Image (cartoon, rainbow, N blue to C red):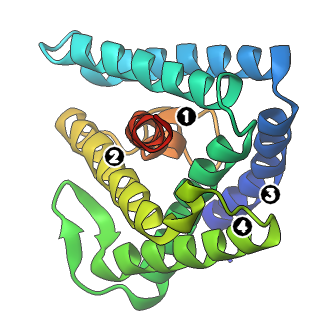
Amino acid sequence: MSQELFKRLLSSIILIPVVLFIIIKGSLIFICFIVICFFISIYEWHMISKKKFYSLFGYIFIFFSFLSVYKLRINSENDYWDLLFIVTICISTDIGGYVFGKIFKGPKLSRFSPNKTYAGMFGGFLLSIVSIYLFVNIFLLTNEFMDNWLVMVILISSISQIGDIFISFFKRLRNIKDTGKIIPGHGGLLDRIDGMIFAFPFSYIIFLINFN
């Protein structure tokens, strides 16, 4: 096992349970957590965009993305389940893409993100579907939204992967590999949540449509 892969696995083992605990706990600890993540994301975006003409759009988008996270958790009628649903899809998509991409390799998905392959894309879909199938059945979530869980998984996973490529595009413009060094094995926070910051506002809109 390479040192980089070991760092990546160790970081994930530590971070995932912590994040899940904070989401479930909610309240002030959750608000403090997303505020800290917001400012780190803003800083990393600032370092990537370097006052380019598109930098302002990035700041605005990140703000509304984190606002949607807050609303999905604090203002949700389903407590923390909606946010957990989305986070599970995004994490599974990322892990599936990484593992399948490493194992099967194959044609590249985009020149903007040279590590992304078609095998990784399908791996992301597959693992997210399996994860949410277990999620829905273990926790017996049977409302109208969950009845359409498969469609939602495909949509959210697709948006997450597009977000990943989108941030990779801006990293390529700056000729950098990572947005930062805050997370060992992963790079910056935006490297870790690039798909999520796109998936959250999209999912929030879908939730509004479903429940109103």
Q: Earlier in the sequence, mark 2 or mark 3?
A: 3
How far apart are the alpha carbons under marks 2 and 1? Answer: 14 Å
Structural crowding at the residue carrying mark 1, measured as other residues with C-alpha within 10 Å and reported as few (<14), some (14–19) or many (≥20): many
What is the three-letter code of the residue carrying label 1?
Answer: Leu
Q: Is residue 204 above or below residue 166?
A: above
Q: Which residue is mark 4?
A: 135
Q: Mark 4 packing: few (<14 Cα in 10 Å), some, or many (20+)?
A: some
Q: Residues within 10 Å of mark 3 (few under 14, many from 20)?
A: few
Front one among 132 and 187: 132
Q: Are marks 3 and 4 in contact (CB under 8 Å)?
A: no
**Mark number, residue 27:** none
Describe the element under mark 3 as helix, strand or loop.
helix
The residue identified by callout 2 is 163
Amino acid at circle 2:
Gly
Label 1 residue SS: helix
Question: Of helix, strand and loop, which one carries label 4?
Answer: helix
Check the image and report above or below for 30 versus 21.
above
**CA separation in Å, label 2 and label 4:** 23 Å
Q: Which residue is mark 1?
A: 189
In the displayed structure image, the side of residue 126 where residue 73 appears, left or right = right
Alpha carbon distance from label 1 to label 4? 26 Å
Q: In the drawing, does residue 74 fall left or right of residue 13? A: left
